[in-house]
Amino acid sequence: MKIPAPKLAGILAGFLLLQLFAIPPVFAQVIPPCIDTPIGCLSTDLETGELVRQLFAIFATILGLTAVINFIRGAYITMVSGDNPEELQRGRQIMTASVAGLIFLLLFVFIVDILGIDILSDRVTPW
Protein backbone atom coordinates (compact mmCIF):
# COMPACT_ATOMS: atom_id res chain seq x y z
CA MET A 1 0.00 0.00 0.00
CA LYS A 2 1.38 3.37 -1.00
CA ILE A 3 0.75 6.42 1.21
CA PRO A 4 0.07 9.65 -0.76
CA ALA A 5 2.84 12.26 -0.53
CA PRO A 6 0.75 15.00 1.23
CA LYS A 7 -0.46 12.55 3.86
CA LEU A 8 3.07 11.25 4.41
CA ALA A 9 4.34 14.81 4.76
CA GLY A 10 1.65 15.51 7.36
CA ILE A 11 2.55 12.41 9.34
CA LEU A 12 6.25 13.28 9.28
CA ALA A 13 5.55 16.90 10.28
CA GLY A 14 3.41 15.71 13.19
CA PHE A 15 6.14 13.31 14.32
CA LEU A 16 8.76 16.08 14.14
CA LEU A 17 6.55 18.44 16.17
CA LEU A 18 6.12 15.77 18.83
CA GLN A 19 9.89 15.36 19.00
CA LEU A 20 10.37 19.12 19.32
CA PHE A 21 8.08 19.38 22.34
CA ALA A 22 9.26 16.21 24.07
CA ILE A 23 11.68 17.23 26.80
CA PRO A 24 14.29 14.60 27.45
CA PRO A 25 15.02 13.91 31.12
CA VAL A 26 18.61 15.13 30.69
CA PHE A 27 17.38 18.69 30.30
CA ALA A 28 14.95 18.54 33.24
CA GLN A 29 17.12 20.64 35.55
CA VAL A 30 16.38 23.01 38.37
CA ILE A 31 15.88 26.52 37.00
CA PRO A 32 17.55 29.29 39.02
CA PRO A 33 15.16 31.82 40.60
CA CYS A 34 16.57 34.66 38.50
CA ILE A 35 18.96 35.41 35.67
CA ASP A 36 21.61 38.06 36.36
CA THR A 37 21.70 40.67 33.59
CA PRO A 38 23.28 44.13 33.34
CA ILE A 39 19.86 45.70 34.02
CA GLY A 40 19.16 43.58 37.10
CA CYS A 41 17.91 40.16 38.08
CA LEU A 42 15.19 38.83 35.72
CA SER A 43 12.88 36.37 37.42
CA THR A 44 12.40 32.95 35.87
CA ASP A 45 9.14 32.29 37.74
CA LEU A 46 6.91 31.57 34.74
CA GLU A 47 3.92 30.47 36.78
CA THR A 48 3.20 33.93 38.15
CA GLY A 49 4.30 35.74 35.00
CA GLU A 50 6.97 37.78 36.76
CA LEU A 51 9.37 37.48 33.83
CA VAL A 52 6.71 38.78 31.45
CA ARG A 53 6.02 41.72 33.79
CA GLN A 54 9.70 42.57 33.99
CA LEU A 55 10.19 42.36 30.22
CA PHE A 56 7.10 44.52 29.73
CA ALA A 57 8.51 47.12 32.14
CA ILE A 58 11.83 47.15 30.27
CA PHE A 59 10.03 47.48 26.92
CA ALA A 60 7.85 50.35 28.19
CA THR A 61 10.90 52.13 29.62
CA ILE A 62 12.76 51.91 26.32
CA LEU A 63 9.73 53.25 24.43
CA GLY A 64 9.30 56.10 26.93
CA LEU A 65 12.95 57.10 26.68
CA THR A 66 12.73 57.03 22.89
CA ALA A 67 9.71 59.36 22.97
CA VAL A 68 11.45 61.78 25.35
CA ILE A 69 14.61 61.82 23.22
CA ASN A 70 12.50 62.51 20.11
CA PHE A 71 10.72 65.33 21.95
CA ILE A 72 14.07 66.90 22.85
CA ARG A 73 15.21 66.49 19.23
CA GLY A 74 12.04 68.23 18.00
CA ALA A 75 12.53 71.04 20.50
CA TYR A 76 16.13 71.50 19.32
CA ILE A 77 15.03 71.60 15.67
CA THR A 78 12.39 74.17 16.59
CA MET A 79 14.90 76.33 18.47
CA VAL A 80 17.53 76.37 15.72
CA SER A 81 15.07 76.74 12.83
CA GLY A 82 15.52 80.50 12.73
CA ASP A 83 13.27 82.05 10.09
CA ASN A 84 12.81 78.80 8.18
CA PRO A 85 9.09 77.92 8.51
CA GLU A 86 9.55 74.39 7.14
CA GLU A 87 12.06 73.48 9.85
CA LEU A 88 9.83 75.09 12.48
CA GLN A 89 6.90 72.98 11.28
CA ARG A 90 9.08 69.85 11.20
CA GLY A 91 10.18 70.41 14.81
CA ARG A 92 6.60 70.96 15.92
CA GLN A 93 5.47 67.78 14.16
CA ILE A 94 8.21 65.75 15.86
CA MET A 95 7.25 67.16 19.27
CA THR A 96 3.54 66.51 18.65
CA ALA A 97 4.24 62.93 17.55
CA SER A 98 6.39 62.38 20.64
CA VAL A 99 3.67 63.62 22.99
CA ALA A 100 1.08 61.47 21.19
CA GLY A 101 3.42 58.46 21.50
CA LEU A 102 3.84 59.08 25.23
CA ILE A 103 0.07 59.33 25.70
CA PHE A 104 -0.48 56.06 23.81
CA LEU A 105 2.28 54.40 25.83
CA LEU A 106 0.77 55.53 29.13
CA LEU A 107 -2.68 54.33 28.06
CA PHE A 108 -1.21 51.01 26.95
CA VAL A 109 0.63 50.53 30.25
CA PHE A 110 -2.50 51.47 32.19
CA ILE A 111 -4.75 49.10 30.23
CA VAL A 112 -2.29 46.20 30.42
CA ASP A 113 -1.77 46.81 34.14
CA ILE A 114 -5.49 46.79 34.86
CA LEU A 115 -6.56 44.01 32.47
CA GLY A 116 -3.50 41.81 32.39
CA ILE A 117 -2.24 42.01 35.93
CA ASP A 118 -5.07 43.03 38.26
CA ILE A 119 -8.05 41.29 36.67
CA LEU A 120 -6.40 38.13 35.31
CA SER A 121 -4.16 37.44 38.31
CA ASP A 122 -4.87 36.76 41.95
CA ARG A 123 -2.76 39.53 43.41
CA VAL A 124 -4.36 42.72 44.70
CA THR A 125 -2.94 46.15 43.89
CA PRO A 126 -2.29 48.21 47.04
CA TRP A 127 -3.83 51.35 45.57
Image (tube, rainbow, N blue to C red):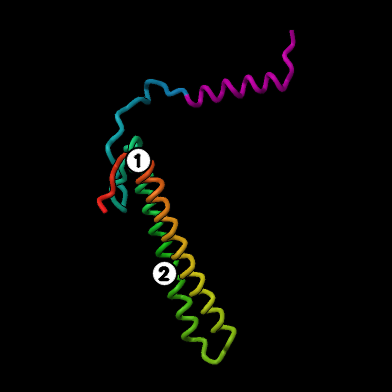
Other-residue count near label 1 (Cα within 10 Å), few / some / many at <14 / 14–19 / ≥20: few
Viewport quadrant of the C terminus:
bottom left
Residue 4 falls inside the magenta stretch:
yes
Residue at the spot of label 2:
68
The three-letter amino acid code for the residue at tag 2 is: Val
Query: What secondary structure is marked by label 2?
Result: helix
**87 to 10, vertically: above or below:** below
The percent coordinates of residue 23 (x first, y second) are: 43, 24
> In the rendered structure, are the residues bearing label 2 and label 1 in contact, judged by CB atoms less than 8 Å apart?
no
Where residue 105 sits, quadrant-wise, is bottom left
Q: Which residues are magenta?
A: 1-21
Find the distance from the CA under tag 2 to the CA under tag 1. 32 Å
Identify which amino acid the numbered label 1 is placed on. Ser
Which element is circle 1 on?
loop
What is the number of the mark on residue 121?
A: 1
Q: Does 73 lie within the magenta span? A: no
Which residue does the image show at 41% across and 63% down from the upper left? Answer: 64
Q: Main secondary structure of the magenta part?
A: helix
